[in-house]
């Protein structure tokens, strides 16, 4: 009898020890408990994708569609030198503020709506002039990014991005300024630190650009630190309109820094090379800011 009583006492002590230990663990780690509750409320499926800018180094990310989230991407300023191989370096210079503003809204896990605009531009008063004159522009583009595969964290991601360009609305709406296009971005995760980006862009309709412009882009984004990445990209125009300023080949290098979970700063340089005589060469420097909310 004494042995049975001792065994019962030991079992009670062991049970009391485990109960106290469990209570101490819960009380000492409230953040973990809150995280577990949040996961249960979200059906236990967290969003593993890090925030990042969609457009980097002439390419677009095919993934990163977050349902219910707003993301804003801004090219805060861009300084462009055109014809930089000529004797007069500053004869054709432009400074752009808000050159690229992209507001993104995840509607579902596979569909994202986008509104892009360009705003204020300083251009030369006349060809060959070193005097710049400011001109306000408001050129919207409405787009939808539709994920086909790979928005669940897999190695491959492919999307369609149909878009409509409306033209500069400061001079009034004109149906002749409408442009229709389709982007097909693709992203492949090579390993934990590198991803390959590919994109095919086709301007399907533009009355002011004939023949329509078709281009392809290839880029590599590499992780250099926990919050730092570098992107190298190249874009090839398969046909160009001589009346429109566009380079046949462009190279871009962008360095981005994820300052917190939802904020990114990027800086970069883009070099354009004309396909024929080099008269349209240009070089541009930019600073960008992106935030998710």
Image (tube, helix red, strand yellow):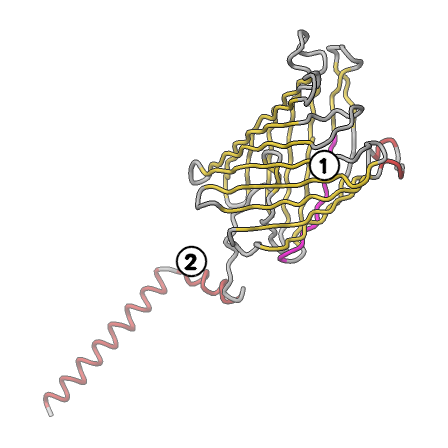
Calculate the distance from the C-alpha at mark 1 to the C-alpha at mark 2: 51 Å
As drawn, the label of residue 108 is: none
Going from the N terminus, do you reach mark 1 or mark 2 first?
2
Magenta residues span 109-119
Question: Dot 1 lies on which element?
Answer: strand
- Tags 1 and 2 touching, CB below 8 Å: no
Residue that lies at the very extreme toward the bottom in this rendered image: 1
Residue 11 in which image quadrant: bottom left
Q: Which residue is more in the foreground, 164 or 210?
A: 210
Residue 125 in which image quadrant: top right
Q: Position of residue 271 (x, y in %)?
A: 61, 23
Question: Dot 2 lies on which element?
Answer: helix
Q: Which residue is mark 1?
A: 214
Label 2 CA crowd tier, 10 Å (few <14, some 14–19, many 20+) = few
Q: Which residue is mark 2?
A: 31
Q: Quadrant of the N terminus?
A: bottom left
Q: Position of residue 215 (x, y in %)?
A: 68, 35
């Amino acid at each position: 009898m004494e042995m049975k009583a001792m065994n019962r006492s030991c079992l009670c002590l062991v049970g009391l020890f485990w109960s106290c230990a469990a209570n101490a663990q819960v009380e000492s780690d409230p953040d973990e408990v809150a995280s577990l509750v949040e996961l249960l409320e979200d059906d236990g499926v967290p969003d593993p994708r890090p925030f990042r800018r969609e457009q980097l180094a002439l390419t677009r990310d095919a993934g990163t569609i977050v349902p219910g989230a707003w993301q804003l991407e801004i090219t805060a300023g861009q300084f462009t030198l055109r014809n930089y191989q000529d004797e007069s370096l500053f004869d054709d210079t432009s400074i752009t503020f808000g050159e690229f503003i992209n507001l993104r809204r995840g509607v579902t896990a596979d569909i994202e709506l986008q509104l892009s605009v360009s705003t204020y531009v300083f251009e030369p008063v006349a060809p060959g002039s070193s005097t710049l004159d400011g001109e306000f522009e408001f050129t919207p583009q409405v787009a939808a990014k539709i994920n086909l595969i790979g928005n669940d964290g897999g190695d491959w991601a492919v999307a369609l991005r149909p878009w409509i360009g409306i033209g500069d609305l400061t001079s009034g709406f004109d149906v002749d300024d409408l442009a229709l296009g389709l982007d097909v971005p693709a992203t492949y995760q090579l390993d934990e630190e590198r991803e390959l980006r590919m994109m095919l862009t086709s301007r399907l309709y533009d009355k002011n650009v004939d023949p329509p412009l078709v281009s392809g882009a290839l880029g590599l984004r590499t992780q250099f630190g926990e919050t730092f990445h570098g992107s190298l990209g190249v874009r090839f125009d398969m046909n160009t309109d001589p009346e429109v300023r566009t380079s046949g080949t462009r190279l871009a290098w962008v360095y981005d820094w994820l300052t917190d979970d939802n904020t990114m700063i990027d800086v970069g340089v883009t070099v354009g090379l004309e396909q024929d005589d080099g008269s349209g060469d240009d070089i541009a420097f930019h600073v960008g800011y992106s935030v998710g909310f």
